[in-house]
Image (tube, rainbow, N blue to C red):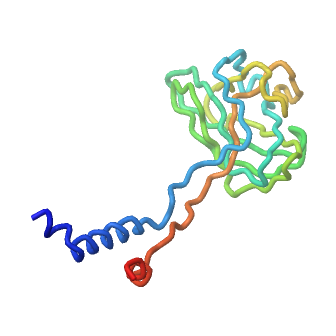
Amino acid sequence: MIGHWCSGRSLRGALVAAVLFAAAATVAAAADLVDQENVSGDFVADPGLNAFAPVGQEFVPSLQAVDFVEVFISNPYSSLTSAVGVELHVDTIGGTLLGSTGATEVPRSHHGPIRCSFTETVQLDPGARYVFLIQELAGVEVTLMATPDLYPQGRFIFWGEPYTEFDAWFREGVVATGTPAPTATWSTVKNLYR
């Protein structure tokens, strides 16, 4: 039995089936590409977005675009849902507006990262300074979690002014799209056995 299964034609058929099965995937898995981040878990401040408005963070990108900003938000009120949004400005919190996200829900009792996605990819100039402004769009006072001053390429902003003792917990980057995987045709598989 084993000898018959491993005979030339059966083995060749099994190899062809394996190659075709492996080539069936046409898109590689997509993963986000994080450009700049400050994700220390050592929180030292939690300014309310309304009480300390405008609140934001400076950053200097190395990529030419941004699709999302993630921030660590706490919604301490257990009975209410809130919503936040991000605006991206050039150089200062009052600089030219480049893009904004829609409202992103912050569930009741939430304490963790929230992703705010821009409606369209925003083009950036690598090495230039940008500021994201985080705003509460609905609900009650949510807080933006801040860490010690660990991000060297920007300052935390509250009451509209740069503050050097803290940085926001944040990530920014682009959503990677799948890339086509090589596909095998019957001719290319057949040529493997010639």
Residue 154: image x %, image y %?
A: 84, 32
Question: In the picture shown, does residue 41 fall above or below 63?
Answer: above
Q: Residue furthest front?
A: 3
Dividing the picture into quarters, in which one does residue 13 lie? bottom left
Q: Is residue 89 above or below residue 143?
A: below
Q: Position of residue 121 (x, y in %)?
A: 71, 57
Q: Is residue 157 left or right of residue 38?
A: right
Q: Nearer the viewer, residue 112 or 19?
A: 19
In the displayed orientation, state which residue is furthest to the left.
1
Q: Residue at x 56, y 25 (%)?
A: 111
- What residue is rendered at 76% in x and 44% in y? 87
State which quadrant residue 191 falls in: bottom left
Q: Nearer the viewer, residue 161 or 188?
A: 188
Up-down: is 46 above or below 133? above
Give the camera-side residue of 7 and 85.
7
Locate residue 34, reporting x and y percent.
67, 43
Query: Is 151 located above or below residue 18 in the figure?
Result: above
- Spot the residue most to the top: 44
In the shown orientation, is residue 190 left or right of residue 140? left
Q: Residue at x 31, y 69 (%)?
A: 15
User: Which quadrant of the figure contains the C terminus?
Assistant: bottom left
Q: Quadrant of the N terminus?
A: bottom left
For the residue pair 13 and 134, the one nearer the viewer reads as 13
Q: Quadrant of residue 53?
A: top right
